[in-house]
Amino acid sequence: MKNRKFVMVMFVAFILISSCKQHQEARRPISQTSGTFMKKSIKRNKKLIAGEEGQIDSIIKSNPKIKYLASTKGYWYSYEIQNQLDTLTPKKGDVAFFDYEIKDIKGNIIYSELELRPQTYFVDKQNIMTGLREGIKLMHKNEKVTFLFPSHMGYGYHGDNKKIGTNQPLLCTVTLRNFKSEKDFKKEGELKPSTPIKQQIKPENKPENKPKDTIK
């Protein structure tokens, strides 16, 4: 009787071990497929970035009179107006007021400054283009800077679903009018709870397209 029980226990254990092993082996190709996909994706992205950086390098070399500086963040910039007197730059907790326009890297206007002005940006607290978010933080008040952004610093694979296409490098010219702390901004009464903050790149929301308020 004891031998029979022992044999039964061993048989059940064997079945369980075999079952576990089968499940593990069945899952192995999934992880292998996932790893292959990731490697291919990384390879594609590296190739894409290298191609865009090559385009940007050609633009820079074709304009030797314009001095472009390389950022550690992966973009290039040139000063049109430089403020060498001030030392402060916008940081988290500040509100920045700026104007800008967007072109393709050949210089064709995509969004004009008139379409996009004015911009009010709560530094590092609003979702804007990565390149702009980083670029504004190196600017001093009243400076005008032209940035060359590869697509991963712009709108990436999806574009902006309007005028900016897939994986499109961008040339942005930014003028930083002013910046101040949120505390001062609120004190001056410029922030009203009922007034929405102007969002970036919404040229289709023009005043003439909005219904007029009814005076009661």
Image (cartoon, rainbow, N blue to C red):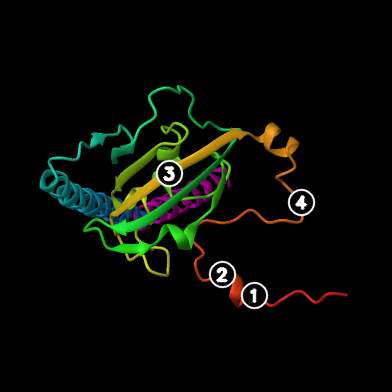
Using the numbered discs, state the Cα–Cα distance from disc 3 to disc 2 in whole angstroms. 22 Å
User: Which residue does the image show at 36% across and 48% down from the upper left?
Assistant: 173
Location of mark 1 (residue): 210
Foreground residue among 5 and 47: 47
- The image quadrant that residue 122 belongs to is top right
Pinpoint residue 138: horizontal percent, then vertical percent. Answer: 41, 32
In the figure, 87 relative to 76: above or below? above
In the rendered structure, which disc, 1 or 3, sits on the residue that comes first in sequence? 3
Element at badge 4? loop
Using the numbered discs, state the Cα–Cα distance from disc 4 to disc 1 in whole angstroms. 20 Å
- The image quadrant that residue 135 belongs to is top left
Q: Tag 1: residue type? A: Lys
Pinpoint residue 118: horizontal percent, then vertical percent. Answer: 53, 53
Pointer 2 and pointer 1: residues touching (CB < 8 Å)?
Answer: yes
* Main SS of residues in magenta: helix
Using the numbered discs, state the Cα–Cα distance from disc 2 to disc 4 in whole angstroms. 20 Å
Numbered mark located on residue 180 in the image:
none
Range of residues picked out in magenta? 1-26
Numbered mark located on residue 205 in the image:
2
Using the numbered discs, state the Cα–Cα distance from disc 1 to disc 3 in whole angstroms. 28 Å
Foreground residue among 98 and 124: 98
In the rendered structure, which disc, 3 or 2, sits on the residue that comes first in sequence? 3
User: Which residue does the image show at 60% across and 77% down from the upper left?
Assistant: 209
Element at badge 3? strand
Location of mark 4 (residue): 193
Pinpoint residue 93: horizontal percent, then vertical percent. Answer: 61, 33
